[in-house]
Amino acid sequence: MHTLTRTATTEMEVTSIRLEKELKDRLKELAGNQGYQALIRDILWKYVQQKSSDYVHSPADIRASIAATAQKEEHCVITGQSIQPQESMLLGLTTYGDLVPISMNSLLM
């Protein structure tokens, strides 16, 4: 997982992004003393981590699970264990709204 180190802004690349005024104002409110640009960087790092193929979830990341059957080989996002085609598995709904493959006993850990 990416550790949020404080990189000097002089070492960062400048990127322009257009935001609606209401969105920018809401981000400023949420950011408080942190600053909205730092908040946006934190949000983007978290998104990149979550979408990374090597991201490991913890059972606490799972809000709900549904019984399923693997149609192709999958890998459990908690243990990394391989789930074979036609093997029973769970689909876990993460706190971020993603459905992810989970081996049957990985939530018991």
Image (spheres, rainbow, N blue to C red):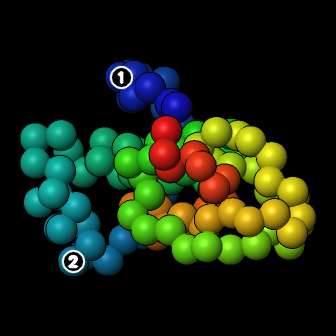
- The total number of labels drawn is 2
Which structural element holds mark 2? helix
Name the residue beneath numbered marker 1. 6
Q: Is residue 76 visible?
A: yes
Residue 94 drawn above or below residue 107: below
Nearest the camera: 13 or 68?
68
- Estimate the x, y position of residue 85 in percent, counting from the top left: 89, 64
Residue 47 drawn above or below residue 13: below
Which structural element holds mark 1? loop
- The residues bearing labels 1 and 2 have C-alpha atoms spaced at a distance of 27 Å
| Residue at (17% x, 68% y) in the render | 25
- Estimate the x, y position of residue 4 in percent, counting from the top left: 39, 28
| Residue at (42% x, 52% y) in the render | 61
Name the residue beneath numbered marker 2. 22
Amino acid found under the numbered disc labelled 2: Glu
Q: Is residue 77 left or right of residue 85?
A: left
Nearest the camera: 9 or 75?
75
